[in-house]
Image (tube, rainbow, N blue to C red):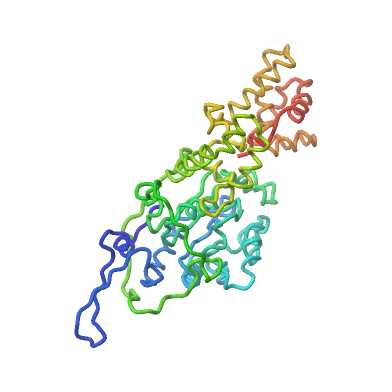
Amino acid sequence: MDARSEVTTQLLSDDGLVVEFKDDTGEGEQQETYRQREFEKRFFSDATNQLFCKTFLEHALRDPISGEIGKSIVFAVSQHHATKLAHFLNLMADKMFPGKFQSDFAVQVTSNVDGAQRHTINFTNNHLLGSANFLPTYKTSKARVCVTVGMMTTGYDCPDLLNLGLFRPIFSPTDFIQIKGRGTRKHGFRTQLFDETLKESVKEPEKTAYKIFDFFANCEYFEHRYNYDQVLQLPKPSSQGSEGGDEGPVTRAGTYQHLGGDILSTLKEVAIGPEGMKIDRMFYAKFEDTVRENDFIAASVEAGQWDRVIDYVNQQVFNQPAEFYTLEKLRQAAAVDRRLTLREILEKIFGLIPRFKSKNELLEEEFVKFVADYKPQEAEAVPAMKTYFKAYATDGRIRHIIDHKEYADLATNPVFSMKDFKAVPDKYRALIPDYIKDYVSLNQFAA
């Protein structure tokens, strides 16, 4: 969601937002120009922050089980800004959902808050300030929004997140990749629902998308304006702690409090498909250049010494401060519907494979190997066997049902039904799972 207010539109413009005011004597006219970098640092506007919160709440993705606002992270400029946003979100949520939250809707999670690290864990585990607020049989965090600055940017894992709020400008591509990566984990919402009768009525139980609320044209910046060829200078170490920008409002001369109103100027929803964003593609390309230019990696790949290559990349290339490459970020940037291995990524970079095969292509290859080994005589049943093979290889729930012989659960399973199971010849109902366990790597089929 690309959302811009009248104030932020001016802050984002080439000319910036020009403010006229009288000097200390009250006579001479002066001007000051503010840009997006100075929002909530030198330029303050409660009206704009309230508009951000209102827009977010009105358009946020809802939880498919309970219908409440989906679990969300909002990224603020500073701890002072985070305090403001949490306050506004709680006030508005109390009006939207009377009696439901009592100011427990949004929680500030920054380094100056006692127990902030525990808050992040409780949010993942669905009991931040309580749970099951709308449905007694559905375990999901009562608090719906964590408002943070930097604590939940890197390495934080919460699969059922549905919304990310960029209530601040972002200029670091590494930060942007990290932040938007918080939403990319898949999730089945019915796993937290303990009412079997309600499970059947959930129409969209799987997380297939998440929504980014971009109030400062960050996506546009990294898609069209950021220079990916520039040589970046590493910032000097900060003495202000790990959460950069956490200081309160700056009080030096030149600060400005916007006391007027603000209205929404543009609101546009843009769907990002499997191709990803430019920043993902450029991130992957930059990693390609990094490993190709490394003499040790190139020589080891040519010699087929894959253990040495993989160990070296893990130790010397991943998680370095300049680019912070990780295997998970490379997987996301490659935009493939399965779990790539580091070896596959390196094989493609050095031209040993032409492209990454899709999940279905690999499944087809594995099933062809199975057919070649066992040469089933029941030709008419081969399509049913293939369906069974693919379902067992890719779906953990199906594997549990088959392995524990809980076949009654297939009656309500949307992926593989009892009818599908009965179409498989008796001999292959046990043979196919055993073959997959012995010869097929299931890790490659994980999303």
Please name whichever residue, 168 or 189, is drawn nearer the observer in this view of the structure.
Answer: 168
**Image point 55% across, 47% down: which residue?**
325
> Which quadrant is the C terminus positioned in?
top right
Dividing the picture into quarters, in which one does residue 399 lie? top right
Number of numbered discs: 0
Say whether residue 377 is left or right of residue 179: right
Asked if residue 404 shows in the view, the reply is yes
**Image point 44% across, 44% down: which residue?**
277
Residue 22 point in image, percent of width and height: 23, 81
Please name whichever residue, 278 or 322, is drawn nearer the observer in this view of the structure.
Answer: 322
Furthest-left residue in this view: 28
Residue 297 in the image: above or below residue 368: below
**Image point 36% across, 54% down: which residue?**
267
Residue 144 point in image, percent of width and height: 56, 61
Residue 313 point in image, percent of width and height: 61, 43
Furthest-bottom residue in this view: 25
Residue 353 point in image, percent of width and height: 55, 27
Say whether residue 64 is left or right of residue 255: right
Say whether residue 117 is left or right of residue 234: right
**Image point 39% across, 58% down: which residue?**
215
Asked if residue 94 shows in the view, the reply is no
Say whether residue 438 is left or right of residue 128: right
Residue 196 in the image: above or below residue 12: above
Residue 165 in the image: above or below residue 378: below
